Amino acid sequence: MTAPFDLTVIRYATNPRRRRIDHLYQLPPGDPHDAPMPIDFFVWIARNDKRTVLIDSGADAAICAARGHDFLRCPTEGLKAVGIDPGDVTDVITTHLHWDHAGNFDKFPNARFHLQEGEMAYATGRYMRYGQLGHSYHVEDVVGMVRLNFKGRVEMCSGSVEIAPGIVLHPAPGHSAGLQVARVHTRRGWVVLASDATHFYENLATNRPFPTALHVGQMLDAYRIVEKLAPSPRHIVPGHDPHVMREYPPPRADLEGIAVRLDLEPNAPAPAFGGSA
Ligand SMILES: [Zn+2]
């Protein structure tokens, strides 16, 4: 067995102005729809002695600004802060092609990219004419992935695939047609990076999907997929939840708020949701 992966999440953008109604589908009567519910934007990096694998490549300052979010740092600056040269990234897993997960391709010149075939088909297919679905994509990212593919740098998969010993990808569609989650073997066991299969702990715990949805039923099924893949609820890492930054230890004290280690045990409990799960 190869060495387990070190696994770190890097926060590259945030939006403290978002409300519950922005993030939770069909809130029940009595829910404080207008209460604050900040959102964070992340990339994840897994490294062992053989590979350096980036899970999602994030967005840049201009795109974050255009979409009304607060850009904090280029994902590559976050990588450098945790001691990783972007040129050393061997693989990029693109969980899906939404704007906040699939930019900055040119900053990883030595990486091959891993994408579900169904996501490529969806992002270049018939539904992109509809603003409700196409809006989540930045067309230059989609075209960028097409260009990478023409250069032979995309491993397009269809279904579950082990891209390296200790990293397995699993389709979990619904939010988009070809969303995949990554299961990473770490020193505390298999950690499931859910990406947007569940944006927040609360989506999963209350069966209330994020409102950006291609197929709500599949999103609910995706929660079951994520639960099944994880050895415990504490091994599920949601894609946009600011709680994650408070639960896990930073790699160094000066990186607090910038990065935390997901391969180490959390030092705070996950948020609870009043028995509504
Ligand atoms: Zn996202």
Image (cartoon, grey):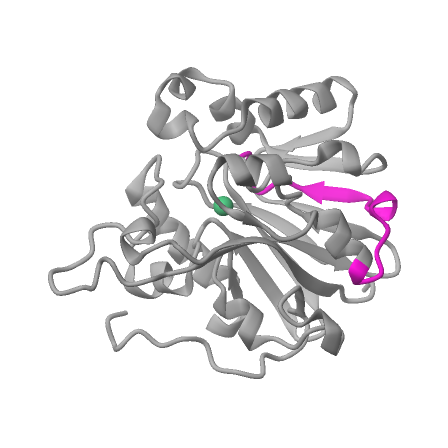
Let me know if residue 85 is in the magenta part: yes
| Quarter occupied by the N terminus | bottom right
Q: Who's the residue at 44% across and 54% down the image?
A: 199
Q: Who's the residue at 35% across and 49% down the image?
A: 210
| Quarter occupied by the C terminus | bottom left
Q: Is residue 250 left or right of residue 174?
A: right
Where residue 206 sits in the image (x, y, percent)?
A: 29, 63
Residue 15 in view: yes
Where residue 57 sits in the image (x, y, percent)?
A: 67, 43
Residue 96 in view: no
Question: How many numbered callouts?
Answer: 0
**Bounds of the magenta span?**
81-98
Where residue 188 sits in the image (x, y, percent)?
A: 66, 75
Q: Is residue 97 above or below residue 58?
A: above
Q: Who's the residue at 56% across and 60% down the image?
A: 192
Front-most of residues 95 and 200: 200
Front-most of residues 150 and 65: 65
Where residue 42 sits in the image (x, y, percent)?
A: 59, 53
Front-most of residues 248 and 37: 37
For residue 193, which quarter of the picture? bottom right
Front-most of residues 131 and 56: 131
Q: What is the chief secondary structure element of the magenta stretch?
A: loop
